[in-house]
Image (spheres, rainbow, N blue to C red):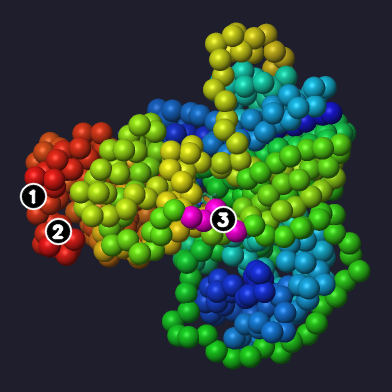
Amino acid sequence: MKTLLVAEYRDGKLLNSTYELIAFAQKLGADATMFLVGSEGALPQFDGNLYLADSGKYGEFNPAVHKQMLLDVVAKEKPDLIVFSHSSYGWDLAPRIAHALQAAQISEVVEIKDGQMVIPVCNSKLRRDISAKTDVTVVTLQAGAFGLDADPNGSPTVENVDTDCLGEIEFTGYEEAEAGGVDLGKAEVIVSAGRGIGKADNVEMIASLAKALGGELGASRPVVDAEWAEHARQVGTTGQTVSPKLYVACGISGAIQHLAGMKKSEFVVAVNTDKDAPIGEVADVLIVADVKEFVPALTAKLQAL
Amino acid sequence: MKILVCIKQVPDMESKFKVNADGTWYDDADLAWRMNEYDEYAIEQAVQLKEQVGEADLTVLCIGPDRVKETMKKALAMGCDRGVHVADDQSAIKDSFAIASIIAEFARDKDFDLIFTGLQSQDRGSAQVGILVGEMLNLTSISTIVDFSYDAGRVSVKRELEGGVRAAVNASTPVLLTCQLGLNTPRYPTLPNIMKAKKKELLSVDVSELLKVEPRLETAKLYFPEKKGSGLILEGDSNALADQLIQLLKDKTAVLA
Ligand SMILES: Cc1cc2nc3c(=O)[nH]c(=O)nc-3n(C[C@H](O)[C@H](O)[C@H](O)COP(=O)(O)OP(=O)(O)OC[C@H]3O[C@@H](n4cnc5c(N)ncnc54)[C@H](O)[C@@H]3O)c2cc1C
Ligand SMILES: Nc1ncnc2c1ncn2[C@@H]1O[C@H](COP(=O)(O)O)[C@@H](O)[C@H]1O
């Protein structure tokens, strides 16, 4: 089997997710070549052929142009499997390639089992074993699902790729996420509020528990999107990555994008009315209760200690 | 200006799921249904755009069994002008390629200036349909937007990347956009608008008129993951639970020391 790995590059740097693609190919026992729109100055540690396009010339985000260059490489290499990260770059480019090749796409693969790809369904409450009926398959990999056993090493044989295809969008630059306020990275205890707290007024209740534990208030995305908490408090893929001694998730279901930000916490307590909530997968203790009853009871007892 | 919004009806993710009889999808009995969260942002953005430009015709499209009409009524009450229900009892087991090709087939000769979809559906979460529709119609498409503005045939959007970084992107219409959470604040339909929505056109088309492709994916089985967590599950009275947890925190962590 032959795989073509589509590496990622942003703001002048190669992204580490590149090594997850290599780990996936190794797990399959497949040959791997790589495609990257990046630069000579930041090459992956990889023993194989690397088709390299210059991001300075073609832009870090320029879907039509990246698509054309990648299709040119596909025509040459004829891979069975084209592999992306399930990331803002990968889920944007992968369907474009799938369509051009009339190939099946399998999104967010977490595992390979008996020749089947395993993907999550319904916020990871369920799993699905799936396979493609087409000769070529496009896959995207869930962030963190595959990892190398050893440190990456090697150096690629580089072949440059060029195109005269023109893009149809104008990418004008990056904006950093709103910063300011708290630095959750330093907190030893984080108590996070999720949508399950019900309303803005209840943030105070969660903040009181955080205070009683000597920690900081964190939040899941819907709480930040609703402006019940500032963005600096958001934990997850598009917020902060934290690893406190204690993380308490209140009314948080445990979507993969939230887990990615907190699963390295030393001890995790979840408070949730749904016993099957996926947060249970990473919780050391799952308290099956209504936050509105349990949290004030706990806070009162902690204050009395 | 002609605008299309594609929405999907999904089960409430807090539901107790069961695997269906043939073991390839979830059983759709006894579930509470709602609009895919991402699609609420898509509708809101389309309605705001219509309010901005004045003259616009806004179609909402949904593929699924009869029950999806309930969700479509919400879209009409939020401000869409007309609904197109593509009647399909088998939509849940169709792959993203098939769903996208149905939408593209419908939209092909209709010259939409803007098409809004969600970034992904909450149950399947493939994040493919929007971009696929764009490719099938040969339209410019931009995914994962968290900010949108329109002026004289140009859109300026921000794509959200990992870490909350945003990429600023401009493009000309016609364009397809996939909407990420937090793009705007979706409105709640008001009672008068719910009443008005009842009079809006809700056309039904049979899927056989629009489906022209073969499935590309095959599901072997759907199942519950093995519980990996070795965590304790505690239930009971809140006060007793609080005592238990405090004891656990004393034993297992240093935070109460
Ligand atoms: C590209 C991308 C990036 C994302 N980035 C992030 C990110 O950085 N951070 C993030 O958090 N999310 C992120 N998300 C969103 C993520 O997918 C989920 O939608 C989000 O994490 C859900 O938040 P939640 O758990 O608070 O809400 P829900 O999923 O709605 O869960 C609410 C939970 O509360 C429980 N509950 C309800 N009532 C009560 C009660 N009274 N007492 C106790 N429990 C109750 C429910 O059982 C449920 O489990 C991202 C999504 C995408 C697509
Ligand atoms: N059955 C459907 N009917 C209409 N639109 C859909 C349907 N399924 C998916 N979509 C659209 O495609 C987006 C992405 O879905 P998916 O690729 O399944 O993650 C959704 O947010 C919807 O906008």
Residue A147, horizontal then vertical, whole percent:
47, 74
Q: Which mark is residue B154?
A: none
Picture quarter with ligand 1: top left
Res. A212 in view: yes
Residue B131, horizontal then vertical, whole percent:
72, 49
Label 3 crowding class (10 Å Cα cut-off): few <14, some 14-19, many 20+?
A: some
Residue at 55%, 35% in the rendered image: B36
Out of A260 and B107, give the one closest to the viewer. A260
- The answer to whether marks 2 and 1 mark residues whose Cβ atoms lie closer than 8 Å is yes
Residue A282, horizontal then vertical, whole percent:
32, 57
**Residue A45, picture quadrant:** bottom right
Which numbered disc, 1 or 3, marks the residue that appears first in the sequence? 3
In the drawing, does residue B117 fall left or right of residue B233? right
Which chain letter goes with mark 3?
Answer: A
The residue that disc 1 covers is: A305
Q: From the image, which quarter does the N terminus of chain B lie in? A: top right
Residue at mark 2 to residue at mark 1: CA–CA distance:
9 Å
Under tag 2, what secondary structure? loop
- Name the chief secondary structure element in magenta: loop
The residue that disc 2 covers is: B256
Give the residue type that dot 1 points to.
Answer: Leu
**Residue B93, picture quadrant:** top right
Under tag 1, what secondary structure? loop
Q: Tell me where the magenta segment starts and ends, as one range.
A: A176-180
Residue at 67%, 8% in the rendered image: B199
Q: Residue furthest right?
A: A164
Confirm or reject: label 3 Cβ below 8 Å from ligand 1. no
Label 2 crowding class (10 Å Cα cut-off): few <14, some 14-19, many 20+?
A: some
Q: Which mark is residue A177?
A: 3
In the drawing, does residue B204 fall left or right of residue A113? right
Out of A253 and A59, give the one closest to the viewer. A59
